[in-house]
Amino acid sequence: MQLDFTNIFNSSCDELKVDYSLSLEDFEYGTYKPLKDGVTVKGRAYSKADVAHLELIVSFDFYGMCDRCANEFKRAYSFDINKIVVPHLENELDDDGYVITENNILDIDDLVYQEIQLFLPHKMLCNDDCKGLCTKCGANLNREECNCKKDVDPRMAALLELLD
C-alpha cells in the first residue's frame, strides 16, 4: 500500500486511516516462510504542529520451528511503528526516527517488511522455558525424561570416585 502524504505535508488534510492486510508469503526467516496468514496493518497518518506522523499497529501469526526442540509452533505477534514522515532530510546521517518519502509517497508495505525483520528475535523458542533435546539420545526433554548419564568433567572424576 502506498500512502500519499502531499495533503498532510500541506496541512490540507488532518488524518489518513490505514487498515489493510498484507500478504508476506515471500518473507523468509531462516530456512522457512513463517507468515502464512499474512499481516494486518492498522493505524493512521496525521499532522500535528506541522509535523507528519505515522502510527501503525502490525500484527501477525508466526508459524515456526523451535530452535531448541524442533517442534512446530504458532505464536501471535503485535508491535507498534511510530515514525515521523518527512519529504527529505538535510542531514542524511540523522535519519533514525524519520521515514523519508519519495515524491510525497510512502510505501507502507516496504516499511512493514523491514520492521518485521528488525522485530523478530534471532532465536525462536516454542516457549521461554523450553528444555530442548537430549544431546545423547535425542529425547524431547519437554515431553519425557531421558536416562542418559551426564558427562563428568574429567578434572572432577577423582572427586566423584571419593563419593562412591
Image (cartoon, rainbow, N blue to C red):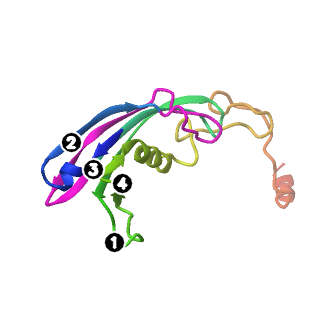
Between the residue at mark 3 and the residue at mark 1, the CA separation in whole angstroms equals: 20 Å
Q: Secondary structure at mark 2?
A: strand
- Tell me which amino acid carries mark 2: Leu
Across and down, in percent, residue 54 comes to 27, 50
- How far is disc 2 from disc 3 in space, using C-alphas? 9 Å
Front-lying residue, 39 or 146: 39
**Mark 1: secondary structure:** loop
Residue 130 occupies quadrant: top right
Q: What stretch of residues is rendered in magenta?
A: 24-53
| Badge 2 or badge 3: first in the primary sequence | 2
Q: Which residue position is annotated with label 4?
A: 102
Q: Is 97 left or right of 67, judged from the image as shown?
A: left
The residue at 77%/40% (across/down) is 135
Q: Which numbered disc covers residue 54?
A: 3
Q: Residue at x 37, y 44 (%)?
A: 108
Q: Which mark is residue 90?
A: 1
Mark 1 or mark 3, which is nearer the start of the sequence?
3
Q: Specify the amino acid type for callout 1.
A: Glu
Q: Is residue 68 left or right of residue 20?
A: right
Instruction: Say left or right for 20 vs 8.
Output: right
Q: Tell me the number on the disc at residue 16.
A: 2
Residue plotted at (24% across, 53% down): 53
Kindly indicate the quadrant of the structure image that contains residue 26.
top right
Q: CA distance from mark 4 to mark 1?
A: 15 Å
